[in-house]
């Protein structure tokens, strides 16, 4: 079980006109398809705590206020294979109850089914973090998993 949880269990992507975004307990990933052969110098990317902006070759691809806050100093972007920009944002609130329902306040919302799957995945990831000796990567969950699932923190051990 040395691989990260999302590598073992997969991700729940939210498709967009420019690519997709998905999340883990701690991070939000944005994958933007760009024209093949794009160079890093063609990319303008601005990452702030609550804002993201991406332009390629002077053409705005993505710009707006993020759904929730991130740690600005930890945000990164990379150009992969000269055809995709991957932006990684670190969430300020890193728990299963902080499931982003959209990338921006004004757009790129996950449909209800995808939101449900994202919340299930984050709840299982939370269980994995709380119980490192078990593997929840292939588990199914039902019942109360919204807002991060049940709170077992006050149970006696």
Image (cartoon, helix red, strand yellow):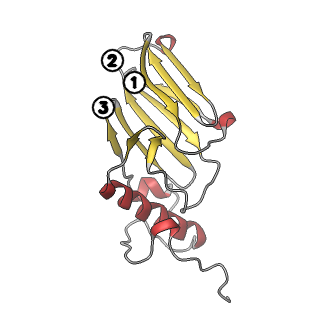
Give how far apart the Cα atoms at labels 3 and 2 are: 14 Å
In this view, the residue in front, 146 or 23, is 146
Of badges 3 and 2, the one in the foreground is 3
- For the view shown, which residue lies furthest in the bottom direction? 156
Residue visible at 65% across and 48% down in the picture:
92
Tell me the quarter of the picture where residue 117 sits. Answer: bottom left
Q: Earlier in the sequence, mark 3 or mark 1?
A: 3
39, above or below 95, in the image: above
* Residue 17 numbered tag: 3
In this view, the residue in front, 146 or 25, is 146
Residue visible at 39% across and 29% down in the picture:
32
| Residue matched to label 1 | 81
Tell me the quarter of the picture where residue 58 sits. Answer: top left
Q: Are marks 3 and 1 in contact (CB under 8 Å)?
A: no
Q: Earlier in the sequence, mark 3 or mark 2?
A: 3
76, above or below 67, in the image: above
């Amino acid at each position: 079980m040395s691989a990260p949880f999302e590598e073992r269990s997969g991700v729940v992507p939210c498709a967009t006109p420019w690519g997709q975004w998905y999340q883990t307990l701690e991070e939000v990933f944005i994958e933007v398809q760009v024209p093949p052969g794009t160079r890093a110098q063609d990319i303008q990317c601005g990452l702030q705590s609550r804002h993201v902006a991406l332009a390629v070759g002077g053409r705005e691809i993505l710009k707006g206020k993020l759904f929730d806050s991130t740690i600005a100093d930890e945000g990164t972007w990379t150009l992969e294979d000269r055809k995709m920009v991957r932006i990684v944002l670190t969430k300020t609130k890193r728990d299963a109850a902080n499931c982003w329902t959209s990338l921006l306040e004004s757009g790129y919302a996950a449909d209800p089914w995808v939101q449900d799957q994202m919340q299930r995945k984050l709840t299982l990831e939370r269980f994995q973090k709380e119980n490192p000796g078990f593997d929840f990567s292939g588990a199914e969950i039902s019942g109360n998993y919204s807002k991060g699932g049940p709170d077992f923190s006050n149970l006696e051990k």
